[in-house]
Amino acid sequence: MKIKVLNSLVTASILACCTVLFGDKSEAGDFKSPDILVLGDSQISFGAGPALVDFLGDLEGHCKPNRRQKTLLKKLGQSEVGVIGVRSTSLHSWTARGGAAKGSICDVDPKWKVNAGSYGVVNKTKNQFVQIGRGRNYQFCAAGKSPFETMFNPSYYDPKLLILTFLGNATKRWQTQPELTARDVRLTTQQLPKGMPCVFMTTAPAYRPDISAQRFEAQQNLRTAMARQGNRCVFVEGLTPETMAGNHGNKKFFRLRKSGTVKDPYHPNERGARHHLKLVGSELCEAIFTALEGKRPRS
């Protein structure tokens, strides 16, 4: 009788662990990491998600690789793409082991009950909006560990290419606090798996030039911090003179009120996101090739 009780307790413990990790123990063995994973902020949910899936799902068509670059793309296999964007987050949200920064990823949004947009192979339903921490594909919230530390292991998320795309929520932080900017870069370098090809791309410009001006300064400060610490990820500037000229004052790239005024000057819509990828596409392609090649990116 004691042996049976002990066996029952062991079985229950194993099942509980599986439930914590995957949300549903029956689905634990079904998870397959995407070949290409994009993590970002709310710009993904507002329009960039589908655009990134389409672009990255056809790198040969969009990047026009030469023979050497075609060989590099073979490292990605079938190039199944997963894209996840979590609102009100930045790079330091993914390296935090607790507090408000981690809470922005792991806490349930009190109003909407979901906090992320999910696209590509990581989303098997018609509903693109999800809550991080719920469901087998979004178990990033273990106690005492950061989301990066929780998700990146060979039995869970193990992409052949990682693309990080953030900026807006860390604008003031990266614009005015160099010590925290350096800390964000250092922790990212420490927590990303060694050898995993990585690209960091700042997000698209806003509708208003004054917003973009602050973000441009933050972008440049982050790039400098990354270069000083060895460029763990290949850097791509989302804010350039060309991309800012394309978005500033351009209503068709942003959500509008019924009156025709811009409702949201911060997040380009899907049309704006696709146009943005056309403008930065060549730089993004080169960054991907450099990351896959495993060379230290240039500053």
Image: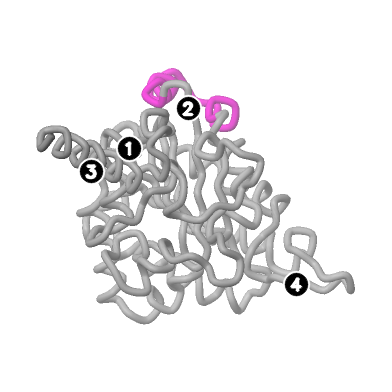
Q: Quadrant of the C terminus?
A: bottom left
**Residue 159 screen position, x and y as percent:** 36, 35
Q: Residues within 10 Å of mark 3 (few under 14, many from 20)?
A: few
Q: In the image, what residue type sits under mark 2?
A: Ser
In primary-sequence order, the first of circles 2 and 1 is: 2
User: In the image as oriented, which residue stretches furthest toward the left?
Assistant: 2
Its colouring scheme is one colour
In primary-sequence order, the first of circles 1 and 4 is: 1
In primary-sequence order, the first of circles 1 and 3 is: 3
Quick one: 44 or 152, which is closer to the camera? Answer: 152
The residue wearing badge 4 is 263
The residue wearing badge 2 is 79
Q: In the image, what residue type sits under mark 1?
A: Tyr
User: In the image as oriented, which residue stretches furthest toward the right?
Assistant: 259
In primary-sequence order, the first of circles 2 and 4 is: 2
**Residue 20 screen position, x and y as percent:** 33, 48
Mark 2 lies on a secondary structure that is loop
Q: In the image, what residue type sits under mark 3?
A: Ser
Quick one: 111 or 10, which is closer to the camera? Answer: 10
Which quarter of the figure has residue 143?
bottom left
Mark 3 lies on a secondary structure that is helix
**Residue 104 screen position, x and y as percent:** 43, 67
Q: At x 24% / y 68%, what residue is drawn?
A: 183
In primary-sequence order, the first of circles 3 and 4 is: 3
Find the distance from the CA under tag 1 to the CA under tag 3.
20 Å
Q: Residues within 10 Å of mark 4 (few under 14, many from 20)?
A: some
Find the distance from the CA under tag 2 to the CA under tag 1.
17 Å
The residue wearing badge 1 is 156
Image: 96 above or below 70: below
Q: Magenta span covers which residues?
A: 59-76
255 relative position to 160: left or right: right
Q: At x 26% / y 51%, what residue is drawn?
A: 149
